[in-house]
Amino acid sequence: MSARNIIALSGSLRKGSFTSAVLRAAVAHAPVGLNITIVDTVRHLPLYDEDLADAGAGDAMRAQIRAADGVLIATPEYNHHLPSPLKNWLDWASRPYGKHPLVEKPVAVFGVSPGSTGAKLAVDYLRYIVPSLGAKLIGDELALGSIKDHLDVDTGKVSDEVSSSLAALLLALQSSFD
Ligand code: FNR
């Protein structure tokens, strides 16, 4: 079986993001056969505007998704929801309705927070909207709370517990291609 190409994105834009650090740890330990590339389209998209969409503003990001075999999304939670930049990415990705590149695409998601919940409400929203958009939601719920106890910000290493949770999610993503 040839390797599968996955694009991965973080819902946090800040340099010291815990979410992005955990995403990098996940990517570093990806199973053989999954080539995961972290992309920064979330940062560079304009705010969703149908006039810009009509002028082709989302074409490149949708082509990026279409070219990938799957998508991995890591999110923090802002005010009990997705951070706006990630919601904006979803809005760009999900047009036109029914014909966008997330249709049938395997998508795995996880949340990260310094608080105890692991961004559960943002994860819940993703786990609701991903299948609603026609994508294939992969894996069990994964909400990584109290992340400061599980992540060494200097080395980027995560605890064994977090590492095995991430490994299980990525194995589920890999298995979705069997
Ligand atoms: C937060 N934070 C937060 N945390 C949480 O568990 N539930 C929430 O609803 C919110 N709401 C929220 C709103 C806004 C505007 C900010 C800036 C922050 C705290 C958040 O979990 C914390 O800042 C994380 O460190 C953000 O993730 P990154 O940037 O470290 O990946």
Image: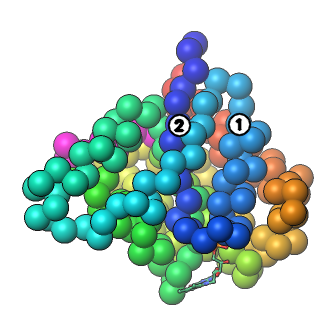
Few, some or many residues within 10 Å of mark 1 (<14, 14–19, 20+): some
Q: Quadrant of the C terminus?
A: top right
Colour treatment of the image:
rainbow
Figure quadrant, ligand 1: bottom right
Q: Nearer the viewer, residue 11 or 15?
A: 15
Question: Is tag 1's residue or tag 2's residue first in the polypeptide sequence?
Answer: 2
Residue drawn 72% across the image and 82% down it? 115
Callout 2: helix, strand or loop? strand
Left/right of residue 109 with respect to residue 90 in the rendered view? right
- Residue at disc 1, secondary structure: loop
Q: In terms of depth relative to the viewer, which is nearer, 50 or 75? A: 50
Q: Amino acid at mark 2?
A: Ile
| Magenta stretch: dominant secondary structure | loop
| Label 2 neighbour load within 10 Å: few <14, some 14-19, many 20+ | many
Q: Is residue 17 magenta?
A: no
Q: Residue at x 17, y 50 (%)?
A: 56
Residue drawn at x 60%, y 71% is 14
Q: What label sits on residue 134 in the rendered view?
A: none
The answer to whether marks 1 and 2 mark residues whose Cβ atoms lie closer than 8 Å is yes
Asked if one can make out residue 143 in the rendered structure from this viewpoint, the answer is no
Residue farthest top in this picture = 1
Specify the quadrant of the image occupied by residue 34: top right
Residue 100 in percent (x, y) is at: 24, 45
Residue located beneath label 2 in the image: 6
Pointer 1 residue: 30
Up-down relation of residue 63 to residue 91 (above or below) = above
> How far, Cα to Cα, is label 1 from label 2?
10 Å
How far from the left and from the top, in percent, is residue 57?
22, 54
Q: Point out the stretch of residues depicted in magenta.
A: 97-106
